[in-house]
Amino acid sequence: MRLRWSRLARRDLADLRRFIEDDNPQAASAQVARIRRSAARIEEFPESGPLITASGLRATGVPGTAYRIVYRIEADLILIVAVWHGARAWPFDPR
């Protein structure tokens, strides 16, 4: 399976980097690297993240962070939809 980042997910990652970089450039790079490693694991085990919506979105946590990678499996493609901080409410959350 191929891994692809949506425009929104790429923007999430860039925004995250910029936000952290203001205080600590090394921490920003480390955080982005952790997220990318977690995304690579999704490629190996695509169904490991639980379904979070009826439309097929899945999410997996990024170890050592409060971030979650939200993704969808589409035939031979894994689409990273968003990188989401756990303290934020997901906009499609049924709560």
Image (cartoon, helix red, strand yellow):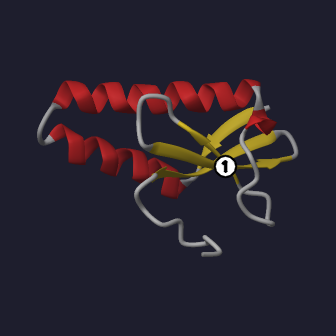
Q: Tell me: residue 74, above or below residue 90.
A: above
Residue 36: x and y in percent read 50, 30
* Residue visible at 33% across and 25% down in the picture: 30
Q: Tell me: residue 89, above or below residue 28.
A: below
Q: Nearer the viewer, residue 44 or 64?
A: 64
Left or right for 55, reference 27: right
Q: Quadrant of the N terminus?
A: top right
Residue 17: x and y in percent read 29, 41
Q: Nearer the viewer, residue 8 or 34?
A: 34
Left or right for 74, reference 90: right
Q: Name the residue at the front extreme.
A: 95
Left or right for 78, reference 23: right
- Is label 1 in a helix, a strand or a loop? strand
Q: Tell me: residue 23, above or below residue 73.
A: above
* Residue visible at 76% across and 35% down in the picture: 48
Residue 38: x and y in percent read 56, 29
Residue 16: x and y in percent read 32, 46
Q: Name the residue at the right extreme.
A: 75
Count of number-bearing discs: 1
Q: Name the residue at the left extreme.
A: 23
Q: Tell me: residue 84, above or below residue 66.
A: below
Q: Quadrant of the C terminus?
A: bottom right
Estimate how packed mark 1 is, as few (under 14), some (14 to 19) or many (20 or more) residues with alpha carbons within 10 Å.
many
Left or right for 95, reference 54: left
The residue singled out by tag 1 in the image is 71
Q: Which amino acid does the dot numbered 1 rest on?
A: Tyr
* Residue visible at 68% across and 47% down in the picture: 79
